[in-house]
Amino acid sequence: MSDRLDDLERRIDELRAGVRTAMRARDGARARVLRAELRGAERAWDALVSGERPVKEEPPRLVTVREQVHQGLRLLGAAAQPRLIVAVSAAFFGGTISSSRLTSLRRDEERSFRSSPFGRPYYLCAALTDRLSPARGLLTLSAWPLERRVVGPLSPRVDFLTCAIAVAEQETGDERADRLLVRMARNIPGAADGTLGPPHRGRVIEAARAELRVHADRDTRDRAELAQRAVAQLDDAARLFGAATLGTIKKEYAT
Amino acid sequence: MSLLTSLARLRALDEGIAQPIATVRHCHLADRPMVFIPLKLSGEAAAPLAAMLGADRDRPRLLVVAQPRNRDLRFAWAAELAGVLLPYVEGFLRDTETVERRNADPYERAIDAPQILVPNRAGVAFVRLLGRSMRFRRADGPYPVPESVPLLGRWLTYFAERAAYPGSSLMPAMTEELGRHWASGQSGLEDANLAALLAWITTGPSDDAEDPLIWPPAGPATDPGFDAEVLAPAMESGSAERVTEALRTQLEPSWRLMWQAIDLLAGLEEGAGVASRWEQDRGSFSGMAAHVAEGAPPQPRRDGAVAAAARLARMERAQAAYDAQRAYDDPLVMAEHRLTGEAFAGEVVDTDPGNTEGEGRSRKLRPLVVIKTDDPVRLSPGTSLGTPQRRAQGAELVSAGEGLVTVKITKGMGRGRTAAPGAVPEIGERVCYTSLTDDFQGSPALPDAEATPWTHGGPPREYVPDDEDAQEEWS
Amino acid sequence: MNPQHRLDVLRGVTPPRPHDARAIAALAANPGCARRALMDGAGVDKDAAARHLGFPAPFGQSPFAITRGNVFEALVKADGCAELLRMLRELLGLPVAEVAYHDVENVGAHLRHAHTRTLIDRAARDEHDAGTLYDHPLLSLEIAGHTAYLEPDVVAFQLGGRFHIVEIKSFAVIDGQADPSAVAAAARQAAVYVLALRTLLEELGHDPLKVSHDVVLVCPENFANRPVASLVDVRRQLAVLRRQLTRMSALDRLLEGLPDDLTFDLRPDDDGRPTRPVAELADALRRTTARYAPDCLSTCDMCFFCRDEARQEGASDLLGRQVRDELGGVASVAEALGLADGTRDPAAGQEEIARLLRNAERLRKECLT
Ligand code: SF4
């Protein structure tokens, strides 16, 4: 067996060198061919050395990714980025999602909605920009009123503060929850008390509310206006998933 | 760089092989040096990726972090590293000698000290960061780490700091040490590549040295092509063996180069001042060990103003002493000073060994020596001089001109009416005199730490590491 | 023939290589080099040229470093730039009410530049709903007749009525200290953005000095991922950059004396593969004067080619500026060695260096034999 391993190692070295030489000469085609061979050889080596191929174990998932995101968003109560949703899900629901799994989620939801509109009790959907296009990297829930799902210039901040309040309102002793709160509190004036321990939850809520009051009027106005426009201009699907921008329309025509 | 070195570089370029710029070795080489080649993960400040290390050239240890973004694995690596380095370091504390001091209590000094060799200056910088990232950790409280980790952090910090001390050999950077003894025909920038510099010294320049497929960089940075094509897929596969084997291919070539470089340096005869500088290293090392044993806190994040000034002054003095010692030990280094006119050498053409000054009881023997030299002397009458040939003597320049220099011996002649045999150079002897002296001035008067002027931030608070230090995530 | 046309001839049918901020910042790295000025001025893809010549540039970025950079940037901008707002409030006293965030990228890619203009114009007019943070803006700068598009990380406004360029970098600041070369590179790059934004304001009829020369540099602090901001004054980098850009728009002088039909064209075939005979391209390049220095190894794609040329010429530049300075203008290795061993007589003005070299040679001989 070790003979074969030696052979494989030699072959792997050759292939690696080949790939890197090709990469340096920017010869993408050749690099791809060699790389494919290399992967094959590496797999063979792995198999030989460990007796079998290593399999990454996945923890059993009882709650679907979709449901975990739903839980997270319900708790937060405002448009949020996948990162934050993942952190909330881990801190309060023992969630196991990673943000990379959320990238295709919105598209799947949209597809499902378009094939049978309102066929599900809820959809994970987009936040809408001031152009009514889907905002990059923000998730919302279909059950929310449109005002909550559109974002004006102040909304990212308002939503962040809203989320911080929601997190601070949770009672848990979980270390991950504390860490999340520390991270959020740090960015709200007056919320952190300068010590290193978990911040006082009441204090965080109060500080966030105080800053919210500064932005609330204008943000509510902006959002109401946007929501009105969305109602007037968009069909059901677009209200949930955003109007296609010129760029995306073009792309869709092309395919 | 001096013109002499520049000329050597030109010669190297012309002849296709590095040229010596030293005739003796100016660094200490331990009987049992520890070679340490650390690698870091690209893009991170101090995330270790691997290290190859050991004191036995046939049996390098390879320590690998199979998933460098995993904090626990990184600290496990740090603990493993401590498991190799700490016993090596502490092994030197067993045998000590008692050193008497004039105005202080005697202290215990280790008879020998550890020597950790890293490939280049970037390696030293990485050791410093590793030390910084470990020394404030705690074995208790939140984010606990193995007990050996903070201790290793303090030692790594110590070694990296000591590496900046002129003339110290506790943690030499190999390319720097080689560059002090040989001039290659490439730029200083390119000399930082260990493979390239060694090629210049041994076989002549080779383009292979710059091909990361043939000679992977000696760290701490890895080759980006290797990261993309080999390391990233290996990590993704989740197979620790594959990551380990991949990193072994990057470290083994440098491991061989390091030992080759050690052999090269060992081939040079040791300079006369090396032992005394190593003695200082031993003293410093023993001091650090005592510090640790007494339970003193880890080195602060930053020096206070007085400590920083004192450190700077110490370094300057050490640099002056190191420069002077090397010149006294090595005619080729002295030649640099001869070129600039601060030293001269030549043949003794006339002497007056019985010359005296003063009358009666204060009459003193002040022999005169006339030297014929080709060197451009730029020293004025009255300048005090020393000479490598008779280190205990002091002399003074009387006059210089037309290739003849008259020197008066002013120190080290004893009380006798006549000079002891051999004390005054004979006609025909070759001698060298220089205004460089090894006895530098004492420490400048710096205020005590408590008396730091307010302009410099007031007295430093005694550094007490707080919880934040311990909790700091590790990238 | 006008200079712009001559530059087009220099580049030939190879598509121009658009400059990014890093490339523009690097323009100032070796201002004395005519070869580089001409290649950059003509928009020649130096990387492709070097590869075709058989001297591929030794640059590359590790995927780990790229990922790390992206992750850190995302962290700084997460949750409506919460971290960035905290830092701007602490560092520059940004009022609490100033939180309006505009993601310029919300419009299609082709509209981004126009949208940036509109938003910046509105802000500069100080209309009441002027934003505070502009994410993913797209600026432009004319480089020797070509438009380069530039993407600063963030532009911040409403700090005392001025615009600040925010530059997010993932190298760490440890105990208040960062790698000086990394900071210098970031400052050079940020200066390019400052210049581009100032140009934009000027075009819009506003005071260009509304763009601060203090840029906000955001880096991770110590070993945690926690971002920390500091102000970096880029006035010096701006001055160097301006000078180099002016020089590049005055390339006529460099073009003088070069044949009209000189070209660095790679003559790509339909697949974009260069077909120009290598020797021919090398010859064309050698018609222009380079000024190789070891620093080129980290700043210019052509470095291995130019180093090879310097080696063939036996230029003392190979050994670095220090050696060059030490030699007081003796440019060739053979000449310097000839002066040292006395086989060559010093030219006028070389007497002093010749004397030193001869002395040095005598001393080395004496010590080594
Ligand atoms: S590498 Fe060549 S072209 Fe580039 S700056 Fe240096 S000398 Fe000029």
Image (tube, grey):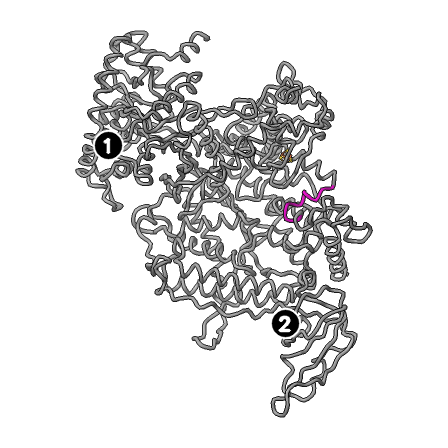
Residue behind mark 1: A164
Are discs 1 and 2 less than 8 Å apart at CB?
Answer: no
Q: Which part of the image, by quadrant, shows the C terminus of chain B?
A: top left
Regarding mark 1 in the picture, which secondary structure is present there? helix
Q: Chain of mark 2?
A: B
Q: Is residue B187 above or below residue B365?
A: above
Q: Position of A138 compared to A199: left or right?
A: right
Split into quadrants, the picture shows ligand 1 in the one at: top right
Q: Which residue is mark 2?
A: B383
Residue situated in front as seen by the camera: C235 or B396: C235
Residue B372 occupies quadrant: bottom right
- Tag in front: 1 or 2: 2
Residue C74 appears left or right of B6:
left
Q: Amino acid at mark 1?
A: Ala
Magenta stretch secondary structure, dominant:
helix
Residue stretch rendered in magenta on the structure: C314-323
- Other-residue count near label 2 (Cα within 10 Å), few / some / many at <14 / 14–19 / ≥20: some
In the displayed structure, C15 sits above or below B180; it is above
Let me know if residue A87 is in the magenta part: no
Q: Is residue A179 visible?
A: no
On the image, the x and y values in percent for residue A250 come to 43, 10
